[in-house]
Image: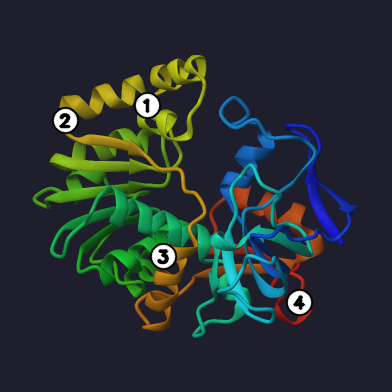
Amino acid sequence: MKAFILEDYGSPLRSTDMPVPVPADNEVLVRMVAAGVNPVDERVRSGDFKSIFPFHLPKVMGGEFSGEVVERGVDVTDIKVGDQVYGYVDLAETGTFSEYIAVDAAAVAPAPMSVSLVEAAGLPVVARTAWQALVDMAKVTEGQTVLIHGGTGGVGSVAVQFAKSLGCTVATTVSTANIDAARDLGADIVIDYQREDLAQALAGTTVDVVLDTQGGDTLKNSLAVVRPGGTVIGITGPPDPEFARRVGVNPVVGLVIRALSSGVRRQARKHGVTYRFLFIGPDGTALRHFSRIVDEGAVRPVIGRVLPFEQTVKALDQVIAGGLRGKVLVTTDPDEVTDHA
């Protein structure tokens, strides 16, 4: 089978031939139909996480996928050969930029029936991010106001819809070109970050939760607009001590993480708010819940472009360049390609 591997941090991904994996007792073997390409893939490639997660190189890259089950381990009973599934694998595991994937059955779920199998590949990362941020961490309730940065990007486009499905008032920041698209997704307050000041645009609005997909100055500004007692959740960093405890890093790395996030946490305390860092993991149960939400019509995937699988490196380049609306996917099905890089 063909796969894209990382041989050294900072080097380009390389296409190679590998044996089709044999699923372990708790795994299913999936013929990959589509894979999502995400900013975290670039962070892995560049070595951002090497002090936290000791990856063994060379490594097949990629984290999310959709496809068809072609074999299952002897302990797998709730997934059958022929099932169409989608999922997300742990960063340390063998990745999804390959024609076949052996993955823990607990990390996959039946794909939503109301979208194509290719489109389903654009959901696992954003679904897990939105669910974990809004439900597990912030515990948002109906009537609260949620600010989601980058509301037409891969994560933001689904998070906006999901927050609306939970009964929240949704504010979002987008570029001038994406204002109408954000409104179409259901955003109540659309802020043009290219022309408007965040604090001024939200003057008089009580913001309970912020999902920050950008980091940097956007994160700092978010701490100032959320209400006292509110929560700011960042997905681009810096990691916080709670994250270090959760993943079990060694004490030295834990001290480094504490130092890296000290400025943000200090600013959060100054404003009387909580800062949390979000790093998702596989969760097939949550994806099963999300499949129902999609099939009920509350959320739909937003796909920016679909490239041929053999152009995975170029697809990653496009994600790095940014400015895209929705997710970038690669597919092994030539009939589903929408763009040739």
Which residue type carries mark 3?
Val
- Counting other residues with Cα less than 10 Å from the Cα at mark 1, is it few (<14), some (14-19), or many (20 or more)? some
The residue beneath circle 1 is: 241
Give the mark nearer the N terminus: 4 vs 3: 3
| Residue sitting at x 82%, y 62% | 310
Q: Residue furthest left?
A: 204
Q: Which numbered tag is attached to residue 333?
A: 4
Give the mark nearer the N terminus: 1 vs 3: 3
Give the mark nearer the N terminus: 3 vs 2: 3
The residue beneath circle 3 is: 158
Residue 36 placement, left or right of 223:
right
Q: Which numbered tag is attached to residue 271?
A: 2
Which residue type carries mark 4?
Asp
Which residue type carries mark 2?
His
Give the mark nearer the N terminus: 1 vs 4: 1
* Whole-percent x, y for residue 177 in the image: 44, 62
| Residue sitting at x 67%, y 72% | 67
- Counting other residues with Cα less than 10 Å from the Cα at mark 4, is it few (<14), some (14-19), or many (20 or more)? some
| Residue sitting at x 35%, y 74% | 184
